[in-house]
Each structure stands twice: as structure tokens, then as C-alpha cells.
Image (cartoon, rainbow, N blue to C red):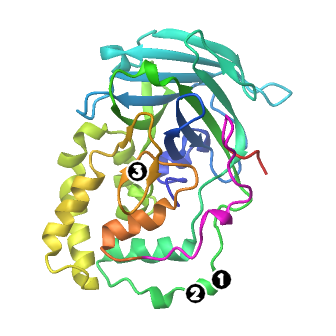
């Protein structure tokens, strides 16, 4: 999995569970995608939730701009009213701030703004692909500190765990001239209104598979990770990831200096933000990471980074039910 149902808190309501986020060059600007509600897309978006595109423009791992999307109740036709707001500066970090309304309309429809932004939200085919046996073997090697053995994986039976499944997607495209910075950082968050007032953060996502690789399935650690900001990642999670990676590469004999490799992994992952150079071709690859495209084989990159060795996935982008489109909103229609 990437971040599909990655913690007990996320499992409580899949509509607020972020499976993946992407940032890449669109046809008119920079495209951002937040996918939630993995495996089915049923129920669409939570009418009491917030779906937040958080953007860091100065490299300090703190959001300077937040685009917030909220939804109304699901109607008889399967649509919802949506509203897009922009919050800047200190307001970008304040869920009680009003912000500026940029767009108002319905899901399933492309909506534009006066500044030539556009947004679309609705059901789509899940573009993520992975072979469950591989991610399970990698996770065991990291969490248990045991050697990773690709020979134990039956690659002849490789199949995409998410083939034929849908997500609820939000696609936001922003003109390049809206960004003063040449390089930005992006992560997605969801939050739910509480009975006592205020908001409770449910999920966050940037790099794929972070929770899946480093935390036992359904653990409290996974919940904790989802509710903290990226600016605290090195302090809160760096020591644990350092220790796990060092033990994993020691067991696999893939580094002459496991401690140094572990430090490099921590530096590469934390703060957990997707960095992207505006106007360039995105690519989450072995040679470098610049945003993340819809077809990138991100799991192989993450596995190789952590274990310091090639880990074949047994799949490529052809494993998805239908390839993403080159046209906005880019995702394939739902299955």
C-alpha cells in the first residue's frame, strides 16, 4: 500500500484517508492531486471534513499557502457542493481562519477561478500500483531487522493490489505565475470537525509508503505520524527511522556503513514533503525526486532508498486498469 488505510484513525472513515498525493506539470500550470477513500471511492467526500493542499514556498517545512476544499452532503445524483478557499501566511496554519473563496460549484465538474486556477473533484480509478507480496517482504525486513530475500517472492504471480479499484480525487491546477518561489514543497492533509469545536487532523501524506514501511500495521505510531507537522519529522521520527534502516541494511549486507546510509535515508525522507521545481517535468525516480507523476513507480524508488538495493516490484504502470490522461483532470475515470 502507499498510504491506503495506513492507520487506525484513517480506517475510522476512509473518506478522510489520503492514499496518495501527486504534484507535476499540468497543461496550464502546476497540478496537485489528493486521492482519498481508497479501494472503492464509496461515499465520496466527508461533508464535515477539510481537504488541504499545503504548500511551503521558502523551504522551512512550514506551509505558507493552504488551499482548502470542503464539501456538502451527497445528493441523490451522487454529487456534492464544493468550495475552494485560499489561506496565506499565518492563516495557512490556522483552520479557523476564513481565507478567500476562489471557487464554488459541484463535484464532477471542472471549475475555474478569476486567476485561471481550476479544480475538479470526483471518483477516479486509483493510479497507484503495487504487488502486495513485495511491500510485505520489505516491511518485514525493516520492522523486524531481518534480511530481505527477493527469491522468496513469487514474481510469476505478481498482480496490482489496487487494480479495478477507485478513489475519490481532488485535482487542483495553479498557474505558474501564482508562485513567487521557483521550488515549492507540497503535502496533503485532512481534518474533521469535532463536537467540541475546532478540528482534528486525520491524515497527512507526501512521500509514498512512509507509514507502511516503518510502522507496524494499525499501530499507534502510525496515528501519531498522521497528526504531526512535517517540521517536526526529524526530531520525532528521525531516530526511529535511522535505527530501523541501519538494522535492515546490516541484515541485508547492502552497505559498508549502515549508520551513514541510515542518515542519508532520514535526510531524504524528512521533512516528509514532496519538493517540486515549478515548470519542470516531475519525476519520482532513482536519480532524483522532483514532485511525483501519476505513472511513476514510486514503490521501487522507496524500497531501493531504504534497503540500499534494487527491489523489483514485478509491475509497471501498465498494471493500472486504465492509464491516466494527458488532459485535465488527468486521472482515469472510475472503474
**Residue marked by disc 2:** 154
> Mark 2: which secondary structure?
loop
- Determine the residue positioned at 58% across, 71% down: 131
**Residue marked by disc 3:** 207
Extreme bottom residue here?
151
Q: Residue 269 vs residue 140: left or right?
A: left
- Determine the residue positioned at 75% across, 25% down: 109
- Depth check, front residue: 295 or 44: 295
Q: Which residues are magenta?
A: 311-330
Disc 3 versus disc 2: distance between alpha carbons?
27 Å
**Residue marked by disc 1:** 157
> Mark 3: which secondary structure?
loop
**Mark 2 touches mark 1? (CB < 8 Å):** yes
Q: Quadrant of residue 39?
A: bottom right
Q: Is residue 135 magenta?
A: no
Which of the marked residues, 3 or 1, is nearer the chain's N terminus?
1
Q: Please tell me whether residue 94 is drawn above or below residue 272 in the rendered image.
A: above
- Depth check, front residue: 205 or 222: 205
Q: Residue 262 vs residue 19: left or right?
A: left
Question: Does residue 9 appear in this view?
Answer: yes
Amino acid at each position: 500500500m502507499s498510504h491506503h488505510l495506513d492507520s487506525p484513525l484513517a480506517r475510522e472513515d476512509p473518506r478522510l484517508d489520503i492514499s496518495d498525493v501527486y504534484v507535476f506539470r499540468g497543461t496550464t500550470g502546476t497540478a496537485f492531486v489528493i486521492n482519498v477513500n481508497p479501494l472503492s471511492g464509496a461515499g465520496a467526500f466527508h461533508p464535515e471534513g477539510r481537504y488541504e493542499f499545503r504548500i511551503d514556498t521558502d523551504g522551512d517545512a512550514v506551509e505558507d499557502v493552504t488551499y482548502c476544499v470542503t464539501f456538502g452532503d451527497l445528493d441523490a445524483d451522487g454529487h456534492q457542493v464544493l468550495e475552494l478557499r485560499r489561506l496565506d501566511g499565518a492563516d495557512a496554519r490556522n483552520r479557523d481562519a476564513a481565507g478567500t473563496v476562489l471557487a464554488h460549484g459541484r463535484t464532477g465538474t471542472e471549475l475555474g477561478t478569476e486567476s485561471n486556477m481550476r479544480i475538479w473533484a470526483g471518483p477516479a480509478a486509483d493510479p497507484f500500483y503495487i504487488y502486495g507480496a513485495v511491500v510485505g517482504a520489505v516491511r518485514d525486513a525493516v520492522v523486524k531487522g531481518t534480511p530481505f530475500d527477493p527469491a522468496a517472492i513469487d514474481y510469476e504471480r505478481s498482480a496490482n493490489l489496487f487494480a479495478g479499484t477507485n478513489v475519490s480525487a481532488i485535482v487542483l491546477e495553479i498557474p505558474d505565475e501564482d508562485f513567487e518561489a521557483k521550488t515549492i514543497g507540497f503535502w496533503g492533509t485532512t481534518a474533521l470537525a469535532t463536537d467540541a469545536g475546532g478540528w482534528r487532523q486525520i491524515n497527512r501524506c507526501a512521500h509514498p509508503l512512509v507509514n507502511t514501511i516503518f510502522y507496524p500495521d494499525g499501530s499507534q505510531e502510525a496515528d501519531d505520524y498522521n497528526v504531526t507537522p512535517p517540521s517536526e519529522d526529524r526530531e520525532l521520527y528521525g531516530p526511529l527511522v535511522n535505527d530501523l534502516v541501519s538494522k535492515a541494511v546490516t541484515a541485508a549486507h547492502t552497505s559498508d556503513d549502515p549508520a551513514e546510509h541510515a542518515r542519508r535515508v532520514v535526510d531524504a525522507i524528512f521533512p516528509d514533503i514532496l519538493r517540486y521545481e515549478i515548470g519542470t517535468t516531475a519525476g519520482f525516480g532513482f536519480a532524483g525526486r522532483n514532485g511525483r507523476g501519476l505513472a511513476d513507480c514510486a514503490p521501487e524508488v522507496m524500497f531501493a532508498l531504504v534497503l540500499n538495493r534494487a527491489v523489483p516490484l514485478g509491475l509497471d504502470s501498465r498494471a493500472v486498469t486504465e492509464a491516466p490522461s494527458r488532459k485535465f483532470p488527468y486521472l482515469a475515470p472510475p472503474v
